[in-house]
Amino acid sequence: MINILVIQVDLVGGYYDAGDNVKFGLPMAFTTTLLAWSVIEFGSSMQDQLENARAAIRWSTDYLLKAATTTPDTLYVQVSKLNLTALHKSLSYHSASMDRTS
């Protein structure tokens, strides 16, 4: 049996990974840090893209701050848009394949 915990909190912002409706906090933090260091090191060469880079960093860091401070003593590291229809189909398939005997 698979248990799923659904918690609804405001975690708007940040970036989804690979178009699969999941936000992974640690890879996002790494990517944001790398982008921020790039702005520090090469910001003078970014010309008209500097504000876009800063906006991208801000969008991610605002999300990461929410993930760390929304609920006391909790850090949200993986967030997903729950698609119950797809989940039901997936669980039905897995339970049906597990019930087979060879």
Image (cartoon, rainbow, N blue to C red):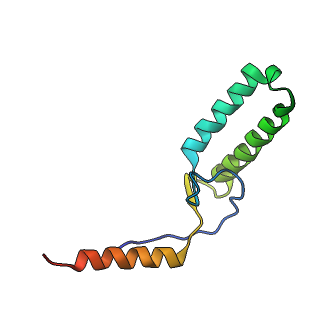
Q: Could you tell me which residue is drawn at 72 percent across and 20 percent down? A: 41
On screen, residue 8 above or below 56? below
Q: Quadrant of the N terminus?
A: bottom left
Q: Quadrant of the C terminus?
A: bottom left
Q: Could you tell me which residue is drawn at 20 percent across and 79 percent down? A: 100
Q: Quadrant of residue 88?
A: bottom left
Q: Is residue 25 left or right of residue 2?
A: right
Looking at the rendered structure, the number of numbered marks drawn on it comes to 0
Residue 26: % across, % down: 55, 43
On screen, residue 101 above or below 12? below
Residue 19: % across, % down: 59, 56
On screen, residue 41 above or below 74? above
Residue 62: % across, % down: 74, 47
In the orientation shown, which residue stands out farthest toward the right?
Answer: 48
Q: Could you tell me which residue is drawn at 77 percent across and 36 percent down? A: 53
Q: Could you tell me which residue is drawn at 52 percent across and 79 percent down? A: 85
In the orientation shown, which residue stands out farthest toward the left?
Answer: 102
Residue 69: % across, % down: 67, 51
